[in-house]
Image (cartoon, rainbow, N blue to C red):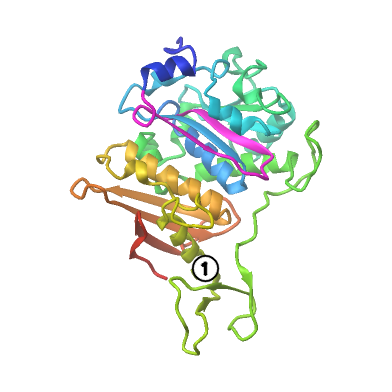
């Protein structure tokens, strides 16, 4: 089927950003590559969530164009060789590798792997098969990703991987095979298959592009490695304070029973406190770092439609990926109150784990109102 719009400029002339579609991106200074989903949201669900999870877990660049209309999102499809929304090039301009996530038709559980980066593509194929996923040997020309102007290949090396996941495979990633906008925005609906699949892709990338390698990007390294995770942002313990590891000032500021500055030494409680600070802070409030916080302003006065949870989830996930990269977001539950205009409740389940998809009990659930009011927390 031919695209409705020839390119992004054509689409933008007919559709409204923030109402019909969203553009999400994150740039990470130390990132070597990017996970992108140009047909995200309701166009080819849940490619946004797959790319976002892989990028945030391994601290890589992320981009997604998301269709968020109540119906007819397929009309927002702009083919990979014509996709030219400017933000994606900002994400890719320094990327040495790219994984471009797409959805294919078909009820069978199959992946088609294309693109000009055959080394990374082969590694992903091998890892997926080892994890029990089917990868087709037949690659239809229309989805082979071999055109140099395909967005998957528009990185520094001119080589990327295009993953085409069948409809049946993508449905297996969510309970009840539900790929509606509201369902894919709910992390708790993800199945084990979602995590097994993304783990295989992330492992393959880490094998070919280990974070520790400092080459100039002209050729990909091939030695095995595992994704690196930045260390927690804490400070060394000071003599006289309990605990032999790290400490963090308790917030809000208070004194302990000895008249000293009250601190935390429990790593779980430190994570809870930092998460609370990120989610409850409005960008611009923190003088030393005006970008710090979660920008939930776009959802404050929206009705309880399908777009509001996507806006909230993206704002919280992007902020946590930037400011707390060692935290694993187990769930984000946005609640838009029709009867209380201007109020948004956000529940965030966080765990501290370096293993993608690892099952563990959430450290806490934090309910926060934008502006900083804490409704409930276990800290």
| Residue closer to the observer: 270 or 108 | 270
- The vertical placement of 127 against 349, above or below, is above
Residue 102 x, y percent position in the rendering: 53, 27
Q: Indicate the secondary structure of the residue bearing disc 1.
A: helix
**Total marks in image:** 1
| Residue 327 part of the magenta segment | no
Residue 110 appears in the rendering: no
Residue 12 appears anywhere in the view: yes
Q: Residue furthest top?
A: 2
Whether 26 is among the magenta residues is yes
The x, y position of residue 282, in whole percent, is: 41, 52
Most distant residue in the bottom direction: 258
Left/right placement of residue 322 relative to residue 276 reads right
Residue 155 in the image, given as x and y percentages of width and height = 67, 28
* Tag 1 residue: 270
Range shown magenta: 16-41
Seen at 77% across and 45% down, the residue is 224
Relative to 379, is 271 on the left or the right? right
Instruction: Kindly identify the residue that appears in the image at 46 percent across and 34 percent down.
Output: 46
Measuring from the top left, give residue 25's x and y in whole percent.
Answer: 52, 37
Q: Please give the name of the residue rendered at 65% of the width and 55% of the height, measured from the top-left corner.
A: 230
Residue toward you, 243 or 369: 369
């Amino acid at each position: 089927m031919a695209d409705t719009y020839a390119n992004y400029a054509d689409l933008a002339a007919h559709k409204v950003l923030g109402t019909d579609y969203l553009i999400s991106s994150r740039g990470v200074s130390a990132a070597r590559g990017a996970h992108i989903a140009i047909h995200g949201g309701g166009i080819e669900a849940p490619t946004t969530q797959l790319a976002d999870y892989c990028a945030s877990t391994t601290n890589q660049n992320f981009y997604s164009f998301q269709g968020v209309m109540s119906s007819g999102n397929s009309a927002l499809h702009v083919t990979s060789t014509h996709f030219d929304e400017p933000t994606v090039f900002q994400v890719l301009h320094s990327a040495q590798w790219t994984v471009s996530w797409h959805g294919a038709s078909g009820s069978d559980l199959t992946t088609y792997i294309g693109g000009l980066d055959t080394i990374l593509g082969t590694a992903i194929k091998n890892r997926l098969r080892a994890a029990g996923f089917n990868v087709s040997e037949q690659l239809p020309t229309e989805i082979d990703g071999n055109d140099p102007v395909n967005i998957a290949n528009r990185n520094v090396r001119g080589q990327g991987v295009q993953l085409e996941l069948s409809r049946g495979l993508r449905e297996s990633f969510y309970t009840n095979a539900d790929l509606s906008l509201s369902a894919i925005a709910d992390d708790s609906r993800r199945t084990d298959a979602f995590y097994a699949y993304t783990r295989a892709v992330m492992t393959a990338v880490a094998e070919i592009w280990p974070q520790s390698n400092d080459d100039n990007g002209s050729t990909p390294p091939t030695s095995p490695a595992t994704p690196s995770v930045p260390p927690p942002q804490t400070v060394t313990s000071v003599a006289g304070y309990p605990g032999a590891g790290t400490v963090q000032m308790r917030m809000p500021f208070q004194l302990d029973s000895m008249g000293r500055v009250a601190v935390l030494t429990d790593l779980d409680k430190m994570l809870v406190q930092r998460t609370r600070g990120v989610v409850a802070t409005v960008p611009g409030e923190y003088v030393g770092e005006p970008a710090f916080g979660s920008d939930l302003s776009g959802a404050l006065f929206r009705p309880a439609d399908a777009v509001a949870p996507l806006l909230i989830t993206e704002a919280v996930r992007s902020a946590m990926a930037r400011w707390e990269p060692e935290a694993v977001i187990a769930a984000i539950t946005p609640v838009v109150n029709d009867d209380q205009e201007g109020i948004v409740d956000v529940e965030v389940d966080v765990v501290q784990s370096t293993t993608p998809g690892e099952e563990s009990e959430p450290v806490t659930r934090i309910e926060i109102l934008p502006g900083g009011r804490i409704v409930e927390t276990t800290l």
